[in-house]
Amino acid sequence: MEGNQWGRSIRAYRKLKGYTQETFANELGISVSVLGEVERGTREPDEQLLQQVAKTLNIQLEDLDLSNK
């Protein structure tokens, strides 16, 4: 999947769960700038980060995959 699609999905779920970029980045152990790059689609998240995002948001990894929707 293209990075931009992951980013849009991550941003949507982050907001749905009530996280700000700052609090979510802190939960993930990454910088706000890295999270912003992922959400904008300028940085492709690796598998480990995607797994951590899904775990933190309490969703399935497949929920982040917009190509299946």
Image: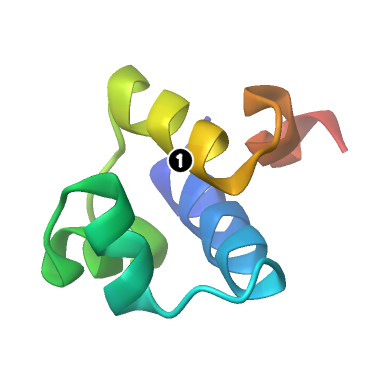
Q: Would you say residue 55 is visible in this rendering?
A: yes
Q: Residue at x 50, y 43 (%)?
A: 56
Looking at the rendered structure, the secondary structure element under dot 1 is helix
Rendered location of residue 6, percent (x, y)? 51, 45
Rendered location of residue 37, percent (x, y)? 23, 63
Rendered location of residue 52, percent (x, y)? 40, 32
Q: Residue at x 13, y 70 (%)?
A: 33
Q: Answer left or right for 2 relative to 48.
A: right
Q: Would you say residue 41 is visible in this rendering?
A: no
Q: Residue at x 56, y 61 (%)?
A: 8
Above or below, 63 against 24 in this view is above
Above or below, 69 against 47 in this view is below
Q: Amino acid at mark 1?
A: Val
Q: Answer left or right for 16 relative to 5.
A: right
Task: Sort mark 1 into few (<14), some (14-19) or many (20+) by Cα contacts within 10 Å.
Answer: many
Above or below, 39 against 51 in this view is below
* Closer to the camera in the image, 29 or 47: 29
Residue at the spot of label 1: 53
Quadrant of image for the C terminus: top right
